[in-house]
């Protein structure tokens, strides 16, 4: 049973620029680091796996989150790596979050699965993955069998070869390589899953430098529903050294693409709007681009139910190089820089937008290198939302919480209202409106923490929801 955590916030709908407060405390300052946030102990808050190099040695590990305070668990059994990627997910279907970790172990690159024992420790699981680093690993159920599958891209140092592979999850922590799809080998790349065409199966986008052609590469691979993937040509910019993210930036129910990087030396940034059968570039997109292994995060930082953009990296423009870390706020898919957010400019960036302190606001974690190649990590608390008292908490009853099947919304007036459910990355998973009581089926949602927002008139109510 998950710990029950309730949180009510009363916020106005008009949100402007906000500040972010440095809450890094004793987290280590690492080089070539990476992180993954997940609730491994099922206590209702997000814990942190963070690892990288200090004095040329790998260090870090699993940091347990206790009400926003982090403690390194020295006996967790999780390894320390650098130049890699990690992702949480219940790969053996036992209700606990496991972790897949890839990266450099001090001698070569490795990719491994660690199963959660449920007592603050993890055990290495004997399954065969391609041993890569300098890339990305992601999880998704792309063969629709109810088990978590896996995709990875990166460099195998033992044979000095880049590769990209997909693996079907067997439901017990084992993974079997898919041999029916040949994805190109990608250097310093990204693989990201999403159902771009809303046909009920999970597609992917692959980004980086295609080492078979020595050219930048950005392509969507469409899933036919049986884990057969076909490369699609949507006229996306072919870039490298940057990042790519799915997100519904215009709230039309389709995931769009934000892309940054370089093709010929100058930094670029693009927004491509998803029209289901094509992607159209937004010619008015004014976010500056970044490279040098830059990072993009899409999240609702100012609580207005639209996805904003965090971007960090090295901006090359007109023969000038400038490190950046910026947040652009989204107003009707038009973005403007939030100059109140003073963030550490970095390159070789790994970042995550998360609500680490369960206050209903999207915080930010970033790690990377300064202009002098000094390892840096910053955890920023989002101080954007001010409490504005109203009586919505007395007008709406949301139950049960935790919920496993059906969520009920009961209210005691006849005023119309909207309801939104977002996961902790800011992705919207439900939107509806009514002037009556509602029942929402959540049985198919992944287990975890969500935010429910009810909007009525000029006020809103935000509550934590736990799906178990």
Image (cartoon, rainbow, N blue to C red):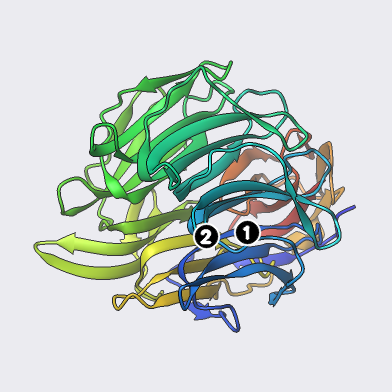
Provide residue 435's location: percent of width, then percent of height: 71, 40
Provide residue 86's location: percent of width, then percent of height: 57, 52
Instruction: Look at the numbered disc 2 and give the secondary structure of its residue.
Output: strand
Sequence-first tag of 2 and 1 = 1
Residue at label 1?
A: 37
Residue at label 2?
A: 352
| Circle 2 crowding by C-alpha within 10 Å: few under 14, some 14–19, many from 20 | many
**Horizontally, is 338 left or right of 49 in the view?**
left
Q: Residue at x 37, y 30 (%)?
A: 184
Say if mark 2 contacts mark 1, CB within 8 Å: yes
**Quarter-wise, where is residue 190 in the image?**
top left
**Quarter-wise, where is residue 202 in the image?**
top right
| Circle 1 crowding by C-alpha within 10 Å: few under 14, some 14–19, many from 20 | many
Label number found at residue 174? none
* Residue 251, visible in the rendered structure: no
Provide residue 32's location: percent of width, then percent of height: 44, 65
Q: Residue at x 73, y 44 (%)?
A: 125
């Amino acid at each position: 049973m998950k710990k029950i955590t309730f949180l009510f916030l009363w916020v106005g709908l008009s949100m402007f620029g906000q500040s972010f407060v440095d809450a890094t405390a004793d987290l280590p300052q690492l080089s070539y680091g990476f992180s993954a946030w997940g609730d491994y102990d099922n206590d209702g808050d997000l814990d942190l796996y963070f690892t990288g190099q200090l004095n040329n040695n790998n260090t870090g590990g699993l940091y347990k989150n206790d009400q926003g305070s982090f403690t390194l668990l020295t006996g967790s059994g999780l390894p320390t790596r650098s130049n890699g990627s990690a992702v949480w997910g219940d790969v053996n279907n036992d209700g606990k979050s496991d972790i897949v970790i890839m990266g450099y172990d001090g001698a070569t690159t490795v990719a491994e699965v660690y199963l959660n024992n449920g007592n603050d420790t993890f055990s290495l699981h004997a399954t065969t993955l391609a041993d890569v680093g300098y890339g990305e690993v992601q999880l998704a159920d792309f063969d629709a069998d109810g088990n978590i599958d896996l995709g990875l891209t990166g460099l195998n140092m033992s044979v000095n070869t880049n590769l990209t592979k997909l693996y079907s999850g067997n439901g017990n922590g084992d993974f079997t390589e898919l041999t029916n799809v040949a994805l190109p080998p990608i250097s310093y790349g990204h693989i990201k899953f999403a159902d771009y065409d809303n046909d009920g199966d999970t597609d992917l986008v692959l980004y980086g430098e295609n080492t078979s052609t020595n050219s930048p590469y950005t392509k969507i691979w469409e899933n036919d529903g049986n884990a057969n993937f076909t490369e699609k040509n949507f006229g996306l910019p072919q870039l490298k050294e940057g990042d790519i993210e799915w997100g519904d930036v215009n709230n039309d129910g389709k995931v769009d693409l934000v892309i940054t990087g370089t093709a010929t030396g100058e930094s670029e940034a693009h927004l491509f709007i998803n029209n289901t059968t094509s992607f159209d570039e937004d010619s008015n997109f004014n976010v500056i681009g970044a490279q040098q292994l830059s990072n993009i995060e899409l999240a609702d930082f100012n609580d207005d139910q639209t996805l904003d953009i965090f971007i960090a990296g090295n901006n090359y423009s007109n023969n000038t190089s400038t490190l950046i870390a910026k947040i652009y706020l989204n107003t009707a898919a038009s973005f403007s820089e939030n100059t109140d957010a003073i963030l550490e400019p970095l390159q070789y960036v790994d970042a995550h937008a998360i609500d680490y302190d369960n206050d209903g606001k999207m915080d930010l974690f970033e790690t990377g290198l300064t202009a002098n190649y000094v390892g840096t990590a910053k955890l920023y608390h989002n101080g954007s939302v001010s409490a504005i008292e109203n009586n919505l908490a007395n007008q709406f009853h949301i139950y049960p919480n935790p919920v496993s099947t059906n969520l009920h919304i009961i209210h005691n007036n006849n005023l119309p209202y909207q309801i939104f459910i977002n996961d902790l990355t800011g992705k919207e998973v439900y939107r509806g409106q009514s002037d009556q009581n509602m029942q929402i089926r959540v049985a198919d949602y992944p287990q975890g923490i969500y935010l429910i927002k009810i909007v009525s008139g000029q006020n809103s109510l935000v509550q934590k929801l736990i799906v178990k």
